[in-house]
Amino acid sequence: MTSPIAFVLGSDSDLDSLEGAFKLLDALEVGYAVRVLSAHRTPDEACSFARNAKDAGCKVLIGCAGMAAHLAGALAAHSRLPVLGVPVDSGPLGGRDALLSTVMMPPGIPVGTLGIGSSGAKNAALLAVRILALQDSALDQRLAAHIDADRKKTLERDSAVQARFRR
């Protein structure tokens, strides 16, 4: 793997929540790898992946899991890379259980936890890009252009709403 970002999913059913994050990274021309490794079903493989990710060229790990979401914590326990956690909105609790499992880490095992579901996945991708952009000026310029485009879209929506409600 030579991708600077690695998404590690607890299940392939989590892929739908990540499509927006993948599109965002593609637009910003940032490489990423995607793996399905469960903290519960494939713990040895998940831990081995985390241990070897830095040597394989990864700079940020993003753990995405639902329900009893221990994946991001397991990755953080076995790597010194930054680990971001995305709770997936699955199961009867709609991702709230995954949020608590991801955010409540013991001292010394940090996981930067984002929001539940697809918005959390997009924010994880953007946060990973911000981390990478600290060392990559070309990426920083692409990120700045992306942020400016979002700003312009919001201002266009503001103008449309103002026009609609102008009295």
Image (cartoon, rainbow, N blue to C red):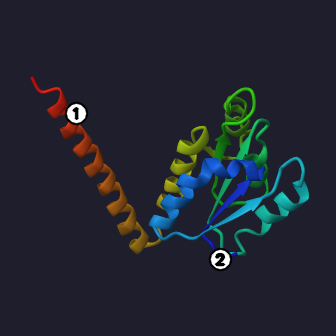
Query: Label 1 to label 2, Cα distance in Å?
Result: 45 Å
The image quarter in which residue 83 lies: bottom right
SS at badge 2: loop
Q: Residue at x 39, y 62 (%)?
A: 143
> Of the residues under marks 1 and 2, which one precedes in the sequence?
2
Quadrant location of the C terminus in the rendered image: top left
Task: Kindly report which numbered mark, 1 or 2, lies closer to the viewer in this rendering.
Answer: 1
- Indicate the secondary structure of the residue bearing disc 1: helix
Residue 1: x percent and y percent?
Answer: 70, 75
Vertical placement of residue 71 versus 98, above or below:
below
Q: Tell me residue 153's x, y (percent).
A: 29, 49
x, y (%) of residue 63? 69, 51
**For the residue marked with disc 2, what is the amino acid?**
Thr
Q: Residues within 10 Å of mark 2 (few under 14, many from 20)?
A: some
- The residue at 57%/71% (across/down) is 31
Q: Mark yes or no: residue 131 visible.
A: no
Q: Is residue 163 above or below residue 131?
A: above
Q: Is residue 162 left or right of residue 92?
A: left
Residue 102 x, y percent position in the rendering:
70, 39
Residue 1 seen by the camera = yes
* Residue at the (22%, 33%) spot, across then down: 161
Q: Residues within 10 Å of mark 1 (few under 14, many from 20)?
A: few
Residue wearing tag 2 = 2
Q: Residue at x 48, y 71 (%)?
A: 29
The outermost residue toward the left is 167
Which amino acid type corresponds to the residue marked 1 in the rendered image?
Answer: Val
Total tally of numbered discs in the picture: 2
Classify residue 148 as left or right of residue 123.
Answer: left
Find residue 161 and name its label: 1
Of residue 63 and residue 111, the one placed in the foreground of this image is: 63
